[in-house]
Amino acid sequence: MRLKRYLIVLLAVPLFAGVNNLSLNKALKIIKKHNLEVRIAKFNQKMKKIESKIAKGYSYGKVDLTIQGMRSNDSGNVFGFKLQSREATFGDFGFAEFDMSGATNPLPVAPKALNYPDARNHYLTKLSFMLPLYTGGKLSEYRKIANKMYSMSKLDSKKVLNNKLFQTRKTFYDIALVENYIRNLGKIISNIKRLENIVSSMKKEGYAKDIDMLEVQARKAEAQNMYSQAKLNRELAYQFLSFLLNRDVNSIKRISDIAKTPRVSKSDIGKNLDIQKAMIGLEVATMAVKVERSNFLPQVGAFGEYGSADNNLFDEFNDKDFYTVGVQVKWNLFNGGIDANNLEKARVREMKVRDQVELAKKGIALHIKKLQSEIKTGNSKIRSFQAQYRFANKVYKNYQARYKEGMVSISDLLIKQSKQLEILLKLLTVKNQRNYKVFELNSILNKG
């Protein structure tokens, strides 16, 4: 029994354990399958696909089966029931009550059989069929619009996915930057601790004062606080990554903290999802004009019925069956100019959407150029801050040696260290901003 429990616990561990050493490529694959917002978007896409099938179904007409059971002693109903059941007789008109001898005038006589009939059951079974033959193109355009809305929903799903891929990449690189920051802070704290030991030794020999030690300890406390905050930020980034992937993530594979800049060609601009949606919107607007134009054309439909009626359900069905077939033409000739104004409104909207498409293309192209310029500026700033940081490290080491020789004060040394930390923060901030622009560019170009 104990062995069985042990095996159950052993098998259950991987189900609750977080993901370790997760690579970016694997994370992106997980996002596509398990992110909740992506899955919700796909459900919306499926519903639009079903709606396109519904729109298609209206062109096939409809068939209804009706079964009615009634009982009535209303004279009109009873006579109608008998007539529909093909059982009406002259006796139902009261002919049996007429005085045919000529002794009296039978016409003023109110026939009791007609006015006060016995209650009767009536069962009607009927199959009805209606089919639109011609609608001026309205149904076909509605079907096309529904298909375009489904295509648009696929772009919406892709946009949600791109956004989650964007967030995942950014979080990975955020973690890489924080890890870099933590490593450098660790080095700075180690330097401060070594400086603390140096000051302690020099204090014993009378070359340093208590205020020097207090300054070093204050700087160490500040650096340790920044170190703790950086670790909390890393933990928060892991929590957000776990939320995106819909599973716990404990660690990721180390990556470069500088994202690769995507290449951009003229054809890439057309791949932008907003432009593709705008193009579909223009097609829909054109179809909407055709829908409004169809209101000026006749609507033609066919209908048919087949059934049987009797006072007993399904009794003598074939002997008492009936059918009706017909065609209906409906043509609106005047409605106060409403159709004409709706058509003009649809035309104006089509022209508006056409201009919006052009505006979107130019706007996206301009935004892409802006992002490319900002990325290049970021690259230049990164190179500059990297050089400054290397220089600041050398200056700090130089001042540390000069402090040992009594050539500079502890305040001068700590100022150089503050400069070192300041440049490090600026370097990481610029990297983060530059990476954000890279991922935004990837998303705009629809490069999942």
Image: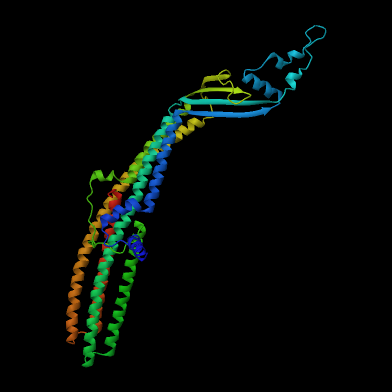
Quarter residue 409 falls in = bottom left
Instruction: Identify the residue at the far top of this view.
Output: 102
**In this picture, residue 303 sits left or right of residue 224:** right
Relative image position of residue 432 (x, y in whole percent): 28, 62
Instruction: Identify the residue at the far right of this view.
Output: 103
Up-down relation of residue 278 to residue 316 (above or below): below
Up-down relation of residue 52 to residue 207 (above or below): above
**In this picture, residue 186 sits left or right of residue 315:** left
The colour scheme of the drawn protein is: rainbow
Would residue 65 be seen by someone viewing this image from the given angle?
A: yes
**In this picture, residue 428 sits left or right of residue 391:** right
Relative image position of residue 410 (x, y in whole percent): 24, 84
**Location of the N terminus (image quadrant):** bottom left
Q: Considering depth in this image, is 305 or 226 the residue closer to the camera?
A: 305
Up-down relation of residue 364 to residue 244 (above or below): above
Residue depicted at 29% across the width and 83% down the height: 217
Q: Considering depth in this image, is 109 or 42 the residue closer to the camera?
A: 109
Quarter residue 374 falls in = bottom left
Residue depicted at 42% across the width and 39% down the height: 50
Relative image position of residue 417 (x, y in whole percent): 24, 77
Relative image position of residue 258 (x, y in whole percent): 23, 60
Quarter residue 112 falls in = top right
Would residue 138 be seen by someone viewing this image from the given angle?
A: no
Count the numbered circles shown: 0
Residue depicted at 29% across the width and 80% down the height: 220
